[in-house]
Amino acid sequence: MENDDVLDPAEGPQQRPQSLMLAFFGNHVLEEGDLCVSSGSVIDVLGRVGVGEPAVRSTLTRMVNRGLLSRQREGRRMYFGLTPHARRILEDGHARIWTRGAVDDAWDGTWTLLGFSLPDSWKSRRHDLRSRLTWSGFGPLYSGLWIAPGEVDVTAVVEELDLSDHVKVFRAQAADLTDIDQMIRDTWDLESIAARYTSFDARWTPHLASEADAGSGSGSGSGSGSGSDDDPIGTRLRLVSEWLWTIRTDPRLPARHLPPDWPAGPAQETFRRVAARTEEPARRMARELLDTARAR
């Protein structure tokens, strides 16, 4: 999940159609091999989270033009699948969610430093580089020197943007005179990152409570933002896309250098509990609902 291909960090929890679209393909296509989904099915599912048909159709076309989706016709219907580029994006997002997680308790003291100097006329490429670095966990130590905790491999980022001649990468450890806590506060907006986690937790915790109430026969009490309990495919799509937006600017800073009440852990627990409860119902609904074909 990188750059503006998936999530704009400024867009807020109500993401644009492209963000929801890739979350949909990540949920229901990524692990199914060369599967394509009809435009009608995509329109149906994204309509459940408030995206209208014209927006879905224009987004599909735009994503084909950007090399994120493939397109093939079967009779009178059009089907869409993932390109290799989109698969790389979604696989990275999948690892970020399910493998690396939101909390780093095992940091070894290593930092990755990346220095770059680009011509003033390269505003677009500078924006792309900064966006990709942000997703990879970097923050601006100084204007042309960015830093990330741990060993971060940025080879693919640098090569894809054709910036090998303009970027230098180092591994380092901070000297004793460096106040790491202060450096982190100066480099990253901790309040903003924490607010995303707190907001996510507040939106989705009521969903768990509503399911508990339903199980005890005391009513549904669905929380705002959690979606309808009888629409697991829409609920899970909203859940995953909101979680990706939440972690978008979190570099997974070392836990020992964060405030003791850092909200990433509780928010991640809420995400994973709702994800576990919606996974199988969403898959069953997808099997019944989605019109699919194998890519040619």
Image (cartoon, helix red, strand yellow):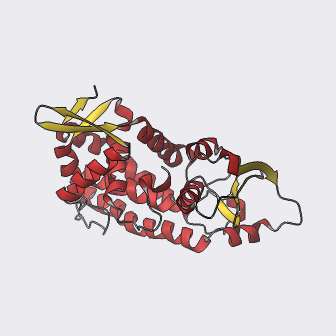
Name, please, the residue furthest toward the top: 296
Residue 158 horizontal/vertical position (percent): 62, 46
Q: Is residue 234 visible?
A: yes
* Horizontal relation, residue 184 to residue 157: left or right: right
* Depth order, front residue of 196/271: 196
Residue 129 horizontal/vertical position (percent): 58, 55
Identified at 28% across, 45% down, the residue is 282
Residue 5 horizontal/vertical position (percent): 43, 52
Residue 48 horizontal/vertical position (percent): 21, 57
Identified at 22% across, 52% down, the residue is 57
Q: Quadrant of residue 32?
A: top left
* Horizontal relation, residue 43 to residue 69: left or right: left
Q: Is residue 155 above or below residue 51?
A: above
* Horizontal relation, residue 58 to residue 14: left or right: left
Q: Quadrant of residue 122?
A: bottom right
Q: Is residue 295 above or below residue 29?
A: above
Q: Is residue 260 above or below residue 68?
A: below
What quarter of the picture does the C terminus occupy?
top left
Identified at 33% across, 57% down, the residue is 238
Identified at 83% across, 58% down, the residue is 174
Q: Is residue 107 visible?
A: no
